[in-house]
């Protein structure tokens, strides 16, 4: 995974609460077996009309938000399905950071796996960023994960909290599986000490359908 | 003073990283075609193997069509490629697979418990948010993303921060005609759509212990609809009675040892939860959603929200958008709303007791003209059992379609879907925009309510069914 470095990008406001992962990537695109290319179908039903043409009403289709790299959204962003295609699509489209008052649990975990930073701020502060991105054309935000700060192109700034392990994983682009495999001895020892015979998933001799 | 969550967490702790993350052992890893292909590709690229194929079980459920004549290769070539990828991956990595034509094929969260694979005190993970279902057995179960699927395949472990505990104590009793689905929707409406975020819910109290295993699965299944990671119900005699004799459940001495160990799986009397909520089951009525998330619901006799009466601006904006999408006026009564389609099935309500409840309403009646009504059994075993007691004939004689097992119109990844603007009464778990098909309008209800809507062609109060249709 790529390391998360400090960057500055255009901020796009999506002033909607409870954006669910069905909206971020509709299910008809989940049949693909690849991990890339989902940016094309991000927010598909909002971005495109039924004839497939871009919906001029949708915020990300406005010329002023082309190339946006920071998304500002309402509370409970990423709710619903566990599909990791949602953060893949956001990242593939070009977002590296999402700012919202709250995120759904599974989605937030999937973002770390996908190299996306989720910044949780109180609703009033999210509102301040949202209004700036709406009111000031070309408004950009500098995201400094190491310092845990956001700084706008007008000088407005704030600090944010993040769990240390999420910060480290993003900053160092860690191979999470490799890290766990370093505990191979502990995993084997756990299996030796804690596993009961009845925990094995073996079809029993007397077992049958009920 | 540990909670049930504390005990299961402690029992599965392999190591901690000192930064708040734990390496948790995975007792069961359930796999399906949609969220696994990229995980297997990752394994292959890194030259890794599946560490515990013996604890890993795969099934095809999301994309298979449900028409009785379904066959491979599927007409949808992208879906066919996904099924072929699962077959290839399972063969290459030694994972057992219930393929589309297997007699036990079905929705992962219906079929795996039926096989006796889900036991009290286990950890159960799957790349699907409705993995929460399995908490009904007193197992710690929640959904994970594809990177975590790959992680579990490679290591047999999941890295997680420990969730908080939320006790939802349900007092009283459900009134006649009120189902576990109605209770789930009531709980979600009380907690709010994101109200359970960061928590595992432990459901407890007399109204919960009175539920059957299938009803408990319905309750735990929908935990994720208030943002909780999962739900838990302490195992008891109901759990044991369900499990004993199932194919993968322990037998003989192992069963006795397991039952003894499972006695510990209860929150201690002085356990401290991070949060506690009490709900009176006797307040539950047959519920229906009016909006575009599962917390936007009311009793069938109630009305859609009036945004003017919602003080919070974000909630108000959400309600306005939901009403517009759903084609409803502020404060519109829900009863009597005409539906185009009825879907009975899913990991929430696709089990035998759900089909019995729907069949009891449908028996001897006819689906209203112009209504498409689908019954999709949750698994091959559910289908066979329903057919053995003649439920298929009850449904087909009433004009319902009796279909093959799968996720079907819950999320419309297969050919079963709504047309734009169509309104459905569905027993599934999500009424999100476009969930059942672009522009489709979903009202979540119980199986009995869905069957009643099919018969009358309108959202109907099934608790007054006897007086109106008796």
Image: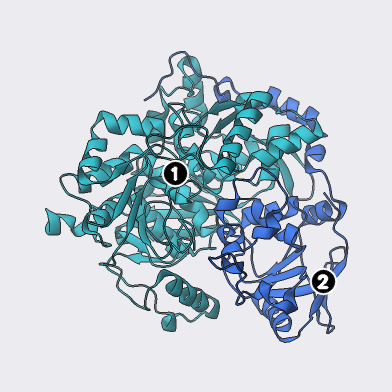
Chain colours: A blue, B cyan
Estimate how packed mark 2 is, as few (under 14), some (14 to 19) or many (20 or more) residues with alpha carbons within 10 Å: many
From the top left corner, tell me how far across and down residue B387 is, in percent: 28, 31
Q: Nearer the viewer, mark 1 or mark 2?
A: 2
Q: Is residue B59 left or right of A41 when viewed as pictured?
A: left
**Closer-to-camera residue (A126/B413):** B413
The chain holding disc 2 is A
Residue located beneath label 1 in the image: B347
Q: Relative to residue B317, is residue B11 depicted above or below?
A: above
Q: Relative to residue B54, is residue A123 depicted above or below?
A: below
Q: Which residue is drawn at the image coordinates 49% and 65% (left, top)?
A: B192
Q: Are marks 1 and 2 in contact (CB under 8 Å)?
A: no
Residue located beneath label 2 in the image: A9
Q: Is residue B267 left or right of B92 when viewed as pictured?
A: left
Q: Is residue A16 left or right of B42 when viewed as pictured?
A: left
SS for tag 2? strand
Q: Relative to residue A102, is residue B11 depicted above or below?
A: above
């Amino acid at each position: 995974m790529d390391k998360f470095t400090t960057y500055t990008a255009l901020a796009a406001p999506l002033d909607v609460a409870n954006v669910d992962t069905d909206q971020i990537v509709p299910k008809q695109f989940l049949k693909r077996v690849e991990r890339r290319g989902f940016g094309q179908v991000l927010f598909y039903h909002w971005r495109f009309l039924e004839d497939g043409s871009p919906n001029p009403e949708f915020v990300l289709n406005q010329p002023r938000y082309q190339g946006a790299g920071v998304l500002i959204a309402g509370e409970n962003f990423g709710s619903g399905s566990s599909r990791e295609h949602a953060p893949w699509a956001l990242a593939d489209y070009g977002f590296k950071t999402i700012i919202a008052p709250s995120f759904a649990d599974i989605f937030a975990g999937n973002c770390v796996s996908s190299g996306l930073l989720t910044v949780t701020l109180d609703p009033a502060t999210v509102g301040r960023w949202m209004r700036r991105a709406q009111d000031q054309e070309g408004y950009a935000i500098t995201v400094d994960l190491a310092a845990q700060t956001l700084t706008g192109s007008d000088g407005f700034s704030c600090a944010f909290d993040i769990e240390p392990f999420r910060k480290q994983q993003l900053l160092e682009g860690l191979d999470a599986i490799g890290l766990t495999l370093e505990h191979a001895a502990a995993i084997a020892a756990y299996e030796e000490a804690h596993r009961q015979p009845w925990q094995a998933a073996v079809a029993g001799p007397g077992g049958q359908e009920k | 003073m540990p909670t049930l969550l504390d005990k299961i967490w402690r029992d599965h702790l392999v190591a901690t990283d000192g930064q708040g993350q734990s390496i948790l052992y995975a007792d069961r890893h359930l796999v399906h075609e949609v969220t696994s292909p990229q995980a297997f590709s990752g394994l292959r690229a890194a030259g890794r193997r599946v560490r515990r194929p013996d604890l890993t079980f795969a099934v095809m459920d999301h994309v298979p069509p449900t028409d009785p004549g379904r066959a491979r290769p599927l007409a949808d070539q992208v879906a066919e490629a996904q099924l072929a990828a699962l077959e290839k991956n399972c063969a290459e990595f030694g994972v057992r697979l219930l393929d589309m034509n297997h007699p036990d094929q079905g929705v992962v969260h219906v079929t795996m418990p039926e096989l006796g694979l889900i036991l009290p005190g286990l950890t159960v993970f799957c790349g699907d948010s409705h993995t929460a279902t399995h908490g009904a057995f007193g197992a710690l179960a929640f959904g994970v993303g594809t990177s975590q699927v790959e992680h579990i395949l490679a290591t047999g472990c999941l890295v997680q921060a420990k969730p908080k505990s939320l006790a939802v104590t349900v007092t009283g009793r459900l009134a006649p005609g009120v189902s576990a689905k109605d209770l789930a929707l009531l709980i979600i409406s009380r907690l709010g759509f994101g109200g359970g975020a960061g928590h595992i819910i432990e459901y407890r109290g007399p109204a919960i212990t009175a539920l059957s295993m299938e009803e408990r699965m319905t309750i735990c299944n929908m935990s994720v609809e208030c943002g909780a990671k999962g739900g838990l119900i302490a195992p008891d005699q109901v759990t044991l009675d369900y499990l004993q004799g199932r194919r993968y459940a322990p037998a003989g001495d192992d069963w006795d040892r397991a039952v003894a160990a499972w006695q510990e799986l209860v929150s201690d009397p002085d356990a401290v939860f991070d949060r506690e909520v009490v709900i009176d089951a006797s307040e539950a009525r047959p519920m229906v959603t009016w909006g575009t998330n599962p917390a936007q619901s009311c009793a069938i006799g109630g009305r859609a929200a009036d945004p003017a009466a919602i003080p919070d601006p974000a909630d108000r904006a959400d309600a306005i958008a939901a009403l517009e999408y759903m084609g409803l006026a502020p404060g519109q009564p829900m009863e009597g709303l005409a539906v185009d389609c009825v879907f009975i099935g899913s990991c929430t309500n696709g089990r035998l007791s759900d089909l019995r409840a729907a069949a009891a309403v449908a028996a001897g009646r006819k689906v209203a003209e112009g209504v498409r009504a689908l019954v999709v059994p949750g698994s091959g075993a559910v289908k066979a059992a329903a057919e053995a007691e003649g439920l298929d004939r009850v449904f087909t004689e009433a004009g319902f379609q009796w279909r093959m097992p799968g996720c079907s119109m819950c999320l419309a990844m297969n050919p079963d879907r709504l047309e734009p603007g169509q309104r459905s009464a569905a027993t599934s778990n999500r009424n999100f925009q476009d969930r059942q098909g672009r522009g489709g309008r979903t009202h979540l209800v119980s199986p009995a309510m869905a069957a009643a809507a099919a018969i009358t062609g309108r959202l109907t109060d099934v608790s007054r069914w006897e007086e109106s249709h008796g």
